[in-house]
Amino acid sequence: MSSSDHPEVVLDGLGDWRSDCGCGTPRSSDIGREVTVLGWVDTRRDHGGIVFIDLRDRSGILQVVFDPDDDAEAHARAHTLRSEYVIAVRGKLAQRPPETLNTELPTGEVEVRAAEMKVLSASRVLPFSLDDEADAGEAVRFKHRYLDLRRPRLQKNLMDRHRATTAIRSYLDGEGFVDIETPILTRSTPEGARDYLVPSRVNPGSVYALPQSPQIFKQILMVSGYERYYQIVRCFRDEDLRADRQPEFTQVDIEMSFVGAEEILALTEGLLAAGAAAIGAPVPEAPFPRMTYDEATRRFGTDRPDTRFGLELVELSDLMEGAQARVLAQAVADGGIVGGIVAEEGHKFSRRELDETVAWAQSIGAKGLAWIRSTDEGWQSPLAKFFDEGEREKIEERTGLRKGGVLFLVAGPRKYAQGILGQLRLRLADMLGLIPQGQWNYLWVTDFPLLEYSTEAKRLVSVHHPFTSPREQDLRLLDSEPEKVLADAYDVVLNGTELGGGSIRIHRPDVQARVFSALSIDESEMREQFGFLLDALSFGAPPHGGIALGLDRLCMLWLGENSIREVIAFPKTQKAHDPMCDAPSPPSAKQLRDLGLKFT
Ligand code: ASP
């Protein structure tokens, strides 16, 4: 048979040829063995009449030698091979001559002397090199993802990911968890994002929502008595795609009955250790350190602090009351704060870098960022003139500002100021090279507020989701001071990245109704959206709680990758597009008619 793309290549059938040896597996102890190997031509080299092929399959690379003295026909055909042809070779494993030993390959001491070859498939010239070092852009890599996935790095990533999920499944199985599937075509599950909607043809005018998480279903499974549920499950969130988000992503989703937070934290620590060990990442030691939300935001300006370095926030609000620097004093008078960060090595920043940092702060929403440089000549700062000697001493004492350092200040409402300083902290650490590599700081953040005021929605919203239980001792504040209520919720963080989070849930319908009402969800909306959950809770719901961990992100961090797209087989671009199959795509006129839809 002749392939139309390669008229010169005659293709063979597979027949009864089967691989009896992975390309990456033979060692010198196998020398003399007769083998059949199948795989892709990684490279071909012609040397003085002899053809060398690096043959590749998922197990690795093996050198195949076509010598006219071994088999003239195979040798002649070897000249027609090109990169990524699929071939089958039979021959004896032999010792490589000393000059061709390759200490970098596990199979580097051996080679196959080809006695027979079949060409099973040809390949067009590749649009980019499959070499890991070669740097093709994502657009072309994603368009030809089938080729991209052949690259050794991605092969390793996906196989390691498989190892991690297998270990996680077996860990959870050992802990008595049952893997139960929940619907993909369902109704909205509030996790704070927009839903992906799927119109229903047989129910004109109605839509399904793809699950943002299986939250309600896993709780219902507890009501149904399964006690320990897990699922490695796809979730869908239609968010504006910030740097490293995917519209669909995978969670390790867990729910347990008759437990408090402690059991869930311990279980999660064990799960993370099992996954890390399977993937070859350092195994974290349990128990992980813990920090309350309040402490995390005060010290680090975020609820997912990177604790690998200092640069902690300091609060100077009391020192700024009535200060001459009006902006600072006013912020405090308005009930806000003045917070700061000292970069001890701040003398390394040029004036230009300071200006750039101010401009950067504005770009992330800061109304202002002040800086004070402490030098041999005293303070250098646009603010210097507002502070006398005594005030300067107090500020230095509070913040630890010394000669050679720079103090950055942000003033405004607490959440805003902490947020800016938290991001500034990361930027400064990066600029000053303060982030240690090879350190794995796992951390629990606990005692989150249950609710927070959203200026966008103009009402209280859930910090996690509406099914999160208030701490028992805070229940009485729910109606009078709802923002003071803390939740029985926890997030797990690794080096400043949130790995996942969960909570003890509300299992009493009356408490759930009170929380809905604190969220300004009225009776009819409550019935319409969540009536089935309230009903379920009214038929003997056990106390329960759970957690979900972002599997893509976990694998990314464990494998030292910079993007979750490197650990997902078929990711989407930042515009939620799959360039390979060109999804999303416009529906046909017939599909629209069937669904009774019209685009405007
Ligand atoms: N459903 C939550 C989420 O997807 C996790 C949980 O509370 O278990 O983030």
Image (cartoon, helix red, strand yellow):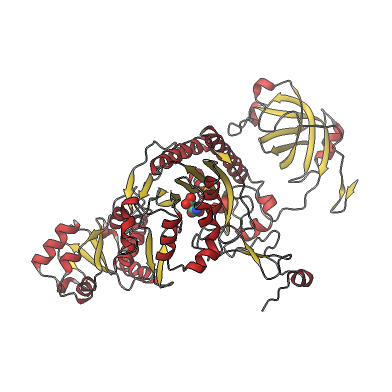
Residue 171 pos. (x, y %): 52, 35
Give the residue at x 34% y 42%. 289
Q: Position of residue 576 (x, y in %)?
A: 60, 63
Q: Residue at x 51, y 63 (%)?
A: 193
Asked if 154 appears above or below 105 in the picture, the reply is: below
Looking at the image, residue 86 sits to the left or right of residue 2; the answer is left
Image-quadrant location for residue 318: bottom left
Placement of 290 over or under 405, stated as above or below = above
Q: Nearer the viewer, residue 438 or 461?
A: 461
Residue 588 image-quadrant placement: bottom right
Q: Residue furthest bottom?
A: 600
Q: Is residue 45 left or right of residue 543?
A: right
Residue 143: in sight, yes or no? yes
In the image, farthest residue toward the front: 539
Q: Position of residue 401 (x, y in %)?
A: 19, 58
Specify whether residue 552 is in view: no
Q: How many labels sit on residues?
A: 0
The residue furthest right is: 1
Horizontal side of 23 relative to 69 (left or right) equals left
Q: Quadrant of the C terminus?
A: bottom right
Quadrant of the image for the N terminus? top right
From the viewer's perspective, tell me whether residue 597 is left or right of residue 159.
Answer: right
Between 175 and 118, the one nearer to me in the picture: 175
Q: Position of residue 41 (x, y in %)?
A: 73, 41
Q: For this rendering, which residue is in front, 180 or 271?
A: 180
Depth check, front residue: 346 or 193:
193
